[in-house]
Image (cartoon, rainbow, N blue to C red):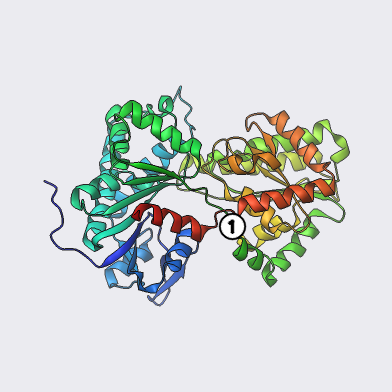
Amino acid sequence: MVRMATTFGAAQVLVASNRGPVSYDVLADGTLAARRGGGGLVSGLSAIGADADALWVCSALSDGDREAVRRGVGEAGVRMLDIPADVHADAYNGIANSVLWFVHHMLYQTPLEPVFDAEFRRQWTSYETYNRAFAEALAQEAAEGAAVVVQDYHLTLVPGMLRALRPDLRIGHFSHTPWAPPEYFRILPDDVAEQVLRGMLGADRLGFLTRRWASAFEACAAELAGGLGDTRIGVHGLGADADFLRKRSHEADVDERMAALKAEIGAGRRAVVRVDRTELSKNIVRGLRAYEHLLETRPQWRERVVHVAFAYPSRQDLAVYRDYTAEVQRLAEEINSRYGTAGWTPVVLHVKDDFARSLAAYRLADVALVNPIRDGMNLVAKEVPVVSDAGCALVLSREAGAYEELGEDALVVNPYDVIGTADALHAALTMAPEERAERTKRLAAAATALPPTQWFLDQLAALRS
C-alpha cells in the first residue's frame, strides 16, 4: 500500500534525472576524484540562488559513483541513489534506451522487432523499481509544497508514483526526446503504454521541446488514457547558451584544434561539418551517402571540399550501436578509398569525443549538416550559427525539433532522401557569402531565443503558478 510521507524534507526545488551534475572515479591510490558536468539544468539551478534549498536527485552510474555513495562522499545539493547495477542496466539499457527511445524515435525494423517477451517483462519490472527509487527519494527530500522537475524518458513513471506519495507537491516532467504519435506508441504492450501515460499524467505540468511533440503526447493521452485530466502542457524550445559558446570557442585549446583541422582540410577547401554522437537517430550513414553522391554527380567538388565528420561513440554497450559506429567508419574509409588523392582526404572522421575540437569545427564550417531521422531538438543546429566565424549554411532535416525555429533560414531536407540531401549540400556550398552571412545572423538569433538558464526558470515559474 502506497502512503504519503509522514515527514517532509527541506528541499524547495528538486530536479530528478538519470545522470547528475557530478560523477566519481576511483584513483589508483583508492581515493575518489569528482568530475563536474554542465548544461542547462546546472545553469538553471545555479540561477535560482544558493539559498533556494535546491536538490538534484540522480543515479549512481559507475563503480566510482557507487563507491562514493557507500563512503558517504557527495556534493552539496546532490543526492545520488545507489540503485543496484543490474537493476539500473535493465531499466536504462533494457527499457529506456532499447524500447522507449526506439519508440519515440520510430526506429524499429518492425518485421523483426520489437518482441515483448518474458525478458522484456523482467526488465520492465526493473524499470518500475528504478522509477520507484527516485519517487521515494524525492518524497523523502521535498519540503511541503516543493516544486519537483523530473527529466526525460528514463523516469516516466516517477510523477504518478510521487503524486501517490506526496500529493502536496508541484510536479513537472520534461521530455528531451520526440514523442511518438499514437499509431506508433501503440507498439508498446497496451498495459505498458497506459502505465507510461498515467505515470506522466501524475504531473501537474508536462514540458516538451516543440509543439509537434506536445501534440503527439496529447493525442496518445486522448486515445489511451482518456485525456489529459488536470495535467497542463507547455512547450519550451531549449536554445543555445550564446555567452558560454562564444567565450569558450575562442580559448587557446580551440585555436589549437582549429589549426590542426585546417591542416587536415587543406588550404582553400570548403568544409562540410557534422558533429554528432553515433546514435541511430542521427542518420550519419545517409549523410555520408549524400556526400558521396555529391562527389559522384558533381565532380567539380572533388579536391575542393572536405566532409569533417565527428561521430562520437554512444551507448557502445549495446550491440546495435557498436555495429552502427563500425558502419560509419567503414563507409568513411570507402569514400576516401574511392575518391581520395595523394593531397586530398574527402572525409576527415574523428570518433574520439573532443569538445574543443567540435567548437573549432563549428567556427570554420562553411556548411553544417544536421540530418537526423528524428530528433527532439538538436542543439548542434543551434550552436553552429552562434559560433561560426564567417557564416555557415545549415542543411537541416525537417524531422529535427530545431526545424520549427530554424527551418525558414535553413536548407531543409527529407532525411531519407540521399539525392535531395546531396542537392542541398551543393546549394549550400554555392550560396553567396552575403546570403550565408545574413541567414547565419537570423539563425543565431532564433537559436538563442531561450537560453538554458531561462529555459529552466520558465518551467519552474510555470509549475509554481
Give the SS element for disc 1.
loop
Looking at this rendering, what residue extends furthest in the top direction? 111
Q: Nearer the viewer, residue 127 or 415?
A: 415
Q: Which residue is mark 1?
A: 353
Q: Report whether 316 appears left or right of 431.
A: left
- What residue lies at 42% left-to-right and 43% top-to-bottom? 97
Q: Nearer the viewer, residue 108 or 389?
A: 389
Q: Nearer the viewer, residue 446 or 382?
A: 446
Three-letter amino acid code at the position of disc 1? Asp
- What residue lies at 46% left-to-right and 68% top-to-bottom? 36
Q: How far across and how far down the image is residue 457, in percent?
A: 44, 59
Q: Nearer the viewer, residue 21 or 171?
A: 171
Q: Is residue 371 visible?
A: yes
Q: Report whether 372 appears left or right of 79.
A: right
Q: Report whether 164 appears left or right of 444.
A: left
Q: How far across and how far down the image is residue 261, in percent?
A: 75, 59
Count residues near mark 1 (Cα–Cα under 10 Å), then give few for <14, some for 14-19, many for 20+: some
- Compared to residue 227, the image places residue 25 above or below, namely below
Q: How far across and how far down the image is residue 179, in percent?
A: 44, 36
Count of picture labels: 1
Quarter where residue 333 is shown? top right
- Compared to residue 215, the image places residue 277 above or below, namely below
Quarter where residue 116 is shown? top left
- What residue lies at 43% left-to-right and 27% top-to-bottom? 184
- What residue lies at 27% left-to-right and 30% top-to-bottom? 191
Q: Is residue 350 visible?
A: no
Q: Report whether 432 appears left or right of 23.
A: right
Q: How far across and how far down the image is residue 59, in percent?
A: 34, 58
Looking at this rendering, what residue extends furthest in the front direction? 465
Quarter where residue 32 is shown? bottom left
